[in-house]
Image (spheres, helix red, strand yellow):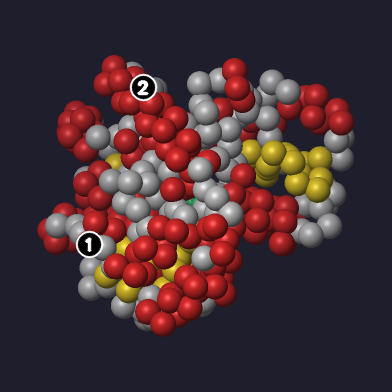
Amino acid sequence: MTVQMDDYIATRAEVRAYLDKALQDANDTSSRELELYDDVKQKLIASGARLIAHYYVHPDIQRLAEETGGIVADSLEMARFGAADTATTLIVAGVSFMGETAKILSPEKRIFMPTLEATCSLDLGCPEETFSEFCDQHSDRTVVVYANTSAAVKARADWVVTSSIAVEVVDALTTRGESIIWAPDRYLGRYVQKQTGADMLLWDSACVVHEEFRLHDLDALMTLHPEAGLLVHPESPDEMIERADAVGSTSQLIEAAVRLPNPTFIVATDKGIFYKMQQQVPDKLLLEAPTRGAGGTCQSCAHCPWMAMNRLSGLNQLLDTWDQRCEIHIDADLGKKAMQPLTRMLDFKATLSA
Ligand code: 13P
Ligand code: SF4
């Protein structure tokens, strides 16, 4: 069952307009950014802050995180690493829900981001008030939300999950006889539902980047590369997921590229992932999965414009000024509520790894 929402459609129109502008700004990045690299690296090391980056941010920032004792990871591992690390100041290069998650899990640490304007269409598509009313209407259900949500939505949830652990968590809840409210990504929700057979009410939101992947043109690409395997992030449309050789979080897709024997992969996720994936499989050919491209409504074409807002110049400015406008603050009571479902996820993950 899917919830139809008129106000979500309005939100989507705003998101599209915002995306166009953000992408234009991101494309203005000049080669001067590269010259900053060494300077920023020295400042970062001297500051003692730890840089935690997502696979979708610019390769220079990923490299910087790796070379300074930080990490490049999927959203689950970013959360786990941030909570476990001893640094008292973390810089999160990603989107706002990732910075907020770090703050919720470590309220005593100072958490900065190069810009707090880097949001996510899933977060925008799930306003807390409407979501809370929806939960109230189905109070007999366990509330499971994707990490790509605001602190307020997390505070309303019983569980937070990321794409790397969603199937396992929902499977465990189903085994306990629980029925579920799922938000916000409908594609990931449907994928989890199919994998687990769970009774799930799905919120109707989507990632504006992944929902642009289409089978259209994929067949032509596969004819050219019959040896290719298809790797798909589960925020993508069902038709892509059904054709995939591997479905999973960003880290799981990189692992699949290593594990599967194919010499070539067509990759349906943000193109930022190619930096780390290619390092792991230097001899394999990696191709971008086709999107609706210029004919589609999304101008981002497999690159998240909010992730693209993380730039070396922004990081440089942050390290010079520690501007308050780049620091994450979360109300203490709200943070305590949001910490419970997040901690549940990390504890569950620890039991899987044990
Ligand atoms: P991962 O948890 O797979 O890193 O995904 C985060 C995300 O925002 C994907 O679009
Ligand atoms: Fe959100 Fe999609 Fe960007 Fe991931 S790629 S941060 S889900 S808009």
Q: Picture coordinates of residue 15 (x, y %)?
A: 37, 29
Going 31% across and 51% down the picture, which residue do you hit?
Answer: 116
Sequence-first disc among 1 and 2: 2
Dot 2 alpha-carbon crowd within 10 angstroms: few under 14, some 14 to 19, many 20 or more:
few
Q: Is residue 271 left or right of residue 10?
A: right
Report the residue marked by disc 2: 13
* Residue 228 location, quadrant: top right
> Residue 45 or 105: which is nearer the viewer?
45
Q: Is residue 153 left or right of residue 229?
A: left
Against 284, residue 15 (above or below) is above
- What is the three-letter code of the residue carrying label 1? Gln
Q: Picture coordinates of residue 295 (x, y %)?
A: 59, 18
Q: Picture coordinates of residue 213 (x, y %)?
A: 60, 29
Going 38% across and 37% down the picture, which residue do you hit?
Answer: 122
Element carrying mark 2: helix
> Residue 195 or 20: which is nearer the viewer?
20
Dot 1 alpha-carbon crowd within 10 angstroms: few under 14, some 14 to 19, many 20 or more:
few
Against 293, residue 142 (above or below) is below
Going 25% across and 50% down the picture, which residue do you hit?
Answer: 151
Q: Picture coordinates of residue 294 (x, y %)?
A: 60, 22
Q: Is residue 7 visible?
A: yes
For the N terminus, the quadrant is top left
- What is the three-letter code of the residue carrying label 2? Ala
Element carrying mark 1: helix
Report the residue marked by disc 1: 324
